[in-house]
Image (cartoon, grey):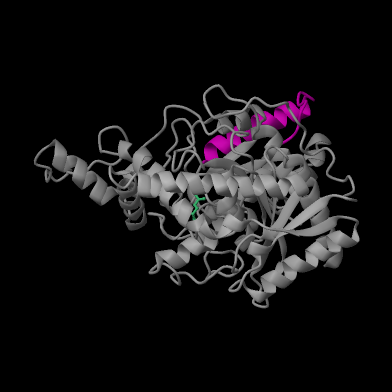
Amino acid sequence: MQLNEMKAHELLPLLKKKEISSTEITESVFKQIDQRKRVNAYISIMKDRAFQQAKIIDKKYSQGEIKKEYIAGIPMAVKDNICIKDFPTTCGSKILNGFRPPYNGTVIEKITRHLGIIVGKTNMDEFAMGSSTETSFFGPTLNPHNLEYIPGGSSGGSAAAVADNQTILAIGSDTGGSIRQPAALCGVVGMKPTYGLVSRYGLVAFASSLDQIGTFSRDVKDSALLLNVIAGYDPNDSTSIKSETIDYTKGLEENIKNLKIGVPREYFIEGIDKRIKARVQKVISDLEKEGAVVEPVNLPHTKYAVADYYIIAPSEASSNLARYDGVKYGYRSGSSGSDKDLLSMYFNTRREGFGEEVKRRILIGTFSLSSGYYDAYYLKAMKVRTCIKNDFEKAFKKCDCLITPTSPTPAFKLGEKTEDPLKMYLSDIFTISANLAGIPGISIPCGKTDEGLPIGLQILASHFQEKKMLKLAYQAEQLLKKEM
Ligand code: GLN
């Protein structure tokens, strides 16, 4: 096995014993990136900086200076909507062309402090709006399992990079499913932590009350390792929560006897791919054999989740994206002298800089927030959001975790849904509710379709119950391993 195909928790002991070096791991990752450019997983790479860091870290390992080796010397990729000082951050958009942030996001500071090596910025749907990575200004990312298919989105670049061994770990953001859905479609593990557990400082805002940074990895243990690094209170983010420091890698092996698993009836509906349904149900019954207690639960407001999200997320986006006006960031129209005054510069910059999907969201959001419509749309949507949150609270009184499919379908072909936004929006039908409620969720691979496309299983838990969620995910992963 090549170094770039291994997991962080397999590489770390070898680094510690000095059997391998961080420079060698980094070399093997960049070799794969060079060979697999077609996948288009990265928007930019950071080769020089990565090798400089690897050299320093190798020295630290050789001098025995590394204490907490959660990710020390491990290459990772970062979604291109998280700010790295002096490196381009594009959000997959033309409008941020030339923007280099003057500061590091908090997760970047934390990764750097823990000696992780950032190898590049990954491709994404423009401003994280999409489920297929096809709305990127830099062209779509392809699914490494079959290059005719999409990798999911919006963090499709991060998911594909992990699946294709073009990195060991990756960071993404999840506003309505953008970590879990591409993880499912690419056959890797993707986790969205509780809202407020990981600082959003330096994450370019899409819908601030829903956005959450999270992890991509090849297995559950690696996600736990990376969560150890990025979780924690940050005074720079007013929604960050003061919580105790937890080692998420501890307790994964504990048995799940009497753990209560809820299976929401509303997630096994008509229209869901048969093979996905069968695979997820098989895992649930295997967990029951291991001693977990399985019972059906109801989340009655699930049917409103997609509609609700598509009022709230665009409303927040229309406000957040007002700042791109050609003055403060990136792209400005009129290089040919076409702008006759300030106002036409604003209009032209936004017309030329934003893609179609972003414009659609700005229009929906501005409409829902406008006077006269606010009560009918935005306010109503906020009330429905509370109902969805209450559904989960009730369910978590009865059970520890919920298990559902991550996505109603496996990966679809490039271009298959681009003409029909509503069809595209339904890709997140099983992931969106967790963002509306602020609860954590993880997707783990649980088999493949007959065409060889990955299937994902989602585990949800109550606020700040990541430990329980990871334990169940780990146990399910072990059972799946035995099956293969
Ligand atoms: N697909 C959803 C959307 O387009 C979710 C995106 C996300 O989680 N960033 O809004």
Magenta residues span 46-70
Q: Position of residue 79 (x, y in %)?
A: 52, 45
User: Along the line of sight, which residue is nearer the eye, 293 or 356?
Assistant: 293
Between 319 and 68, the one lying in front of the other is 319
Task: Judge whether 461 appears above or below 289 on screen.
Answer: above
Q: Residue at x 61, y 53 (%)?
A: 180
Name the quarter where the N terminus is drawn. Answer: bottom right
Q: Is residue 12 magenta?
A: no
Position of residue 463 measured from the top left corner of the image (x, y, whole percent): 67, 39
User: Is 335 situated above or below 185?
Assistant: above
Q: Quadrant of the C terminus?
A: bottom right
> In terms of secondary structure, what is the magenta stretch mainly?
helix
Residue 460 placement (x, y as % from top left): 69, 50
Relative depth, front residue between 165 and 404: 404
Residue 195 horizontal side relative to residue 345, left or right: right
In the image, is residue 53 part of the stretch drawn in magenta?
yes
- Give residue 253's position: percent from left, percent from top: 87, 46
Horizontal side, residue 299 vs residue 104: left or right: right
The residue under the point 81% across, 41% down is 14
Question: How many marks on residues?
Answer: 0
Q: Residue at x 64, y 63 (%)?
A: 267
Q: Residue furthest bottom?
A: 450
Asked whether the viewer can see residue 352, the reply is yes
Residue at the extreme left of the image, as rendered: 340
Relative placement, left or right, of 360 versus 44 is: left
Is residue 91 visible to the viewer in this orientation of the structure? no
Left or right of 119 in this view: 459: right
